[in-house]
Amino acid sequence: MRPQIVLFGDSITEQSFRLGGWGASLADTYSRKADILNRGYGGYNTRWALFLLHHLFPLSTRLVVRDKRRGTVQFVVLQWDSTMDNPTPPVAATIFFGANDAALLGRTSERQHVPLEEYKENLRRIIQHFKKCSPSMLLLLITPPPVDEAGRFGHARSMYGDKAMQLPERTNEVAGEYAKQCVELARELGLPSINLWSKMQETEGWQIKFLSDGLHLTPEGNAIVYQEVVKVLNETSLSATKMSSDVPHHSEIDGQNPEKAFKLQCPAI
């Protein structure tokens, strides 16, 4: 069975399998080598994401018994539930939240707001859950992107006309505070991270080039995420160039003796 790489996040992840999306590009790069699973949920923040963990990435309990000189010690360990469709946990996961957590109180999207410290703690709990699934799982944190407030207002006007918000429901400054907490947590835990908030703003005209509505990504914005994710994966054993295909390439199959190639690479066939 192919290894799996999970993309866990909000709408920016959910939309990543659209034409030109960063998730679709990853799926193409890892074709025949790893399955890219999209677990993106539009509108979700980290608080709501916590409710999904046991549903999407279930754990089971295992009783461990160890003999000690003074008696038997028993304790329960949480681990990946191997009775699910996939008997092995994902080998890697991206965690891409914050765009909704950073919604402002007192504005049109305030129900999505999560306080800054809670956001950081929620990310920590998500990481802890994944590590219970598999201590060796590669976890990559991605910060929320920058916010173009004028772009958000223009999008709202195009959708709702005169009923559109008069004040921005998100600001770039606040999004940057959430990005900082995400990067700090990754540093504390020794995990890789992508500071998308900073990376995109290195390019002049990022507001139009990378954002379609002041928040979500254009194809060029998706390309930035894809490039940065691949850059991290290429520094590990999960580089697509280092991974073997799950079945032989057609050029390796002998037309007169096809079984030979399959026995070498797929002994279970």
Image: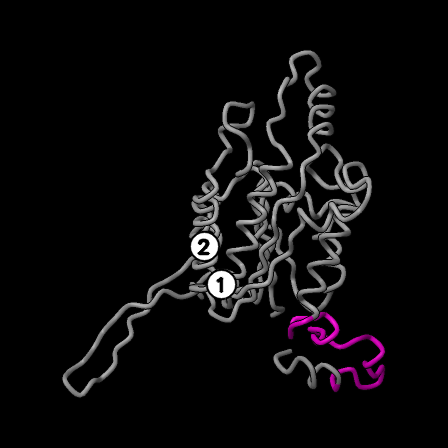
Position of residue 27 in the picture relative to residue 144 (left or right): right
Counting every numbered tag in the picture gives 2
Q: Nearer the viewer, residue 254 or 74?
A: 74
**Position in image of residue 225 (x %, y %):** 71, 52
**Dot 1, crowdedness within 10 Å: few (<14), some or many (≥20)?**
few
Amino acid under disc 2: Arg
- In depth, the one of 197 and 14 nearer the eye is 197
In the figure, residue 71 lies in which quadrant?
A: bottom left
Q: Amino acid at mark 1?
A: Leu
Q: Quadrant of the N terminus?
A: bottom right
Question: Which residue is disc 2 drawn over?
Answer: 124
- Is residue 175 magenta-colored? no
**34 left or right of 98 in image:** right
Question: Is 236 contained in the magenta span?
Answer: yes
Q: With 154 as the anchor, is 193 left or right in this view?
A: left
Q: Nearer the viewer, residue 219 or 257?
A: 219
Residue for point 50% across, 34% down:
113
Distance Cα–Cα, label 2 vs label 1: 9 Å
Residues marked 2 and 1 touching at CB (< 8 Å): yes
Q: Position of residue 198 (x, y in %)?
A: 68, 49
Q: Is residue 40 above or below residue 268?
A: above
Read off the magenta span: 235-260
What residue is at 68 percent from the left and 59 percent from the top? 229
Tell us which disc is closer to us: 2 or 1.
1
Residue lying at 75% horizontally and 55% vertically, measured from the top left: 25
Q: Callout 2: 10 Å neighbours few (<14), some, many (20+)?
A: some
Residue 65 location in percent, x, y?
A: 25, 78
Going from the N terminus, do you reach mark 2 or mark 1 first?
2
Give the image quarter of residue 192.
bottom right
When the figure is inspected, residue 64 is found, relative to residue 96, above or below; the finding is: below
Q: Which residue is mark 1?
A: 189
- Percent x, y of residue 238: 65, 71
